[in-house]
Image (cartoon, grey):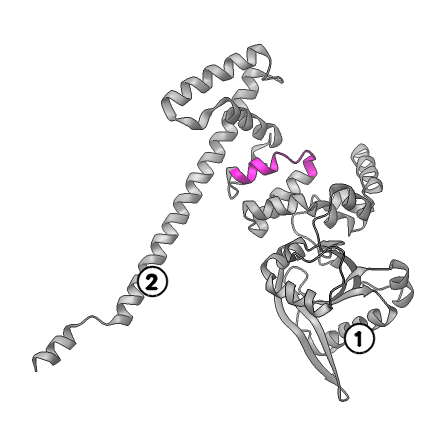
Amino acid sequence: MDEMIKKENLPDNSQSENAYLSIRGHVIDAQRQVYSAVNAAMVTAYWNIGKIIYEVCGENERAAYGKQILNDISDRLTVEFGKGFTVRNLRAMRQFYLAFPIWHTVCAELSWSHYRLLMRVANEKERMFYTQEAVKSGWSVRQLERQINTMFYQRILASRDKESVAAEIQTTEPKPEYERIIKDPYVLEFLNLPANEHYYESTLEQALIDHLQKFLLELGRGFSFVARQKHFNIDGRHFYIDLVFYNYILKCFVLIDLKTGDLTHQDIGQMQMYVNYYTRYMMNEGDNPPAGILLCAQKSNTLMQLTLPENNTQIYAAKYMPYMPTAEELKRELNLDEFEKLEDTNDGEA
């Protein structure tokens, strides 16, 4: 009897676990709210400090007059508030204000570390693009740095209709056009594959699956993974699509076929069949037609144009680069000299 009473008085482990998890969730939520509030207050304070420094020191804070003011402010703030107000940090706050002179362009969701990276981007359009994308996509500081280093902005814009670049970059929500999402080239340096060696398509596919989170970052905003080696059967013949994603911005399936050799017209025709299959049998109500990407080591735009109908808007070939290219390599790959001339022309007309 005593043993039964003792057992009845013992706490239920499942209740204890549920209570712990619930309390833990509230603590984590509170910590996040505190962090967000502190971060927003810090970013606001640094912008205002930068504005004051710019107004007091003028254009050249490194001149004798500006240096004297900065040194004096730094010494007094350091005595009162600690080490965060060195002359170097005060200059960074001034640079912050100059990079984002209009307050409503500052996003409190981003940390000061994000802004330290963004301030290094000289082009204003490019800087605002990365700012908006970092917020929308929830990029960490490391992810933002990676996207800047791989010229994400230039690769996105080079994949679009160049004549409307200037207008498109100002929009906050992409229209349902495939060119806004599909990039060329894709930089896959996170796979750590040899740059000049041949490897099987199955090796590339496995590497992408092993690094799926990083591959989703490279694909861009709105992608979610659906299937690998998606199987379907037509008249007893078996077909397998390497990778299938869904993009909630385009509201469509995106089919990816990997090609480590030269792209052939058979590859293009096969992707056309994959897209037709998804169009007729896999689309859900409200979906847009699927898009197909032939991700290949070498591509031929002429072969694509001759194989596909002139009004093709669904199938694309994009090159992948298994290493982090230099800025010059990417510039050559994207024909950025022509792109930059067009941007300059558009800016002049504006």
Location of residue 72 in the rendering, given as x and y in whole percent from the top left corner: 46, 14
- Between 284 and 300, the one lying in front of the other is 300
Amino acid at circle 1: Met
Position of 262 compared to 211: left or right?
Answer: right
Q: Earlier in the sequence, mark 2 or mark 1?
A: 2
Magenta residues, as a range? 113-125
Residue at 82% of width from left, 45% of height from top? Answer: 332
User: What residue is shown with label 2?
Assistant: 21
- Between 297 and 155, the one lying in front of the other is 297
- Measured along the vertical axis of the image, is residue 301 above or below residue 327? below
- Between 229 and 269, the one lying in front of the other is 229
Quarter of the image where one finds residue 322: bottom right
Residue at 51% of width from left, 24% of height from top? Answer: 90
Residue at 26% of width from left, 67% of height from top? Answer: 16
Location of residue 260 in the rendering, given as x and y in whole percent from the top left corner: 77, 64
- Measured along the vertical axis of the image, is residue 132 above or below residue 286? above
Quarter of the image where one finds residue 37: top left
C-alpha gap between disc 2 and disc 1: 49 Å
User: What residue is shown with label 1?
Assistant: 273
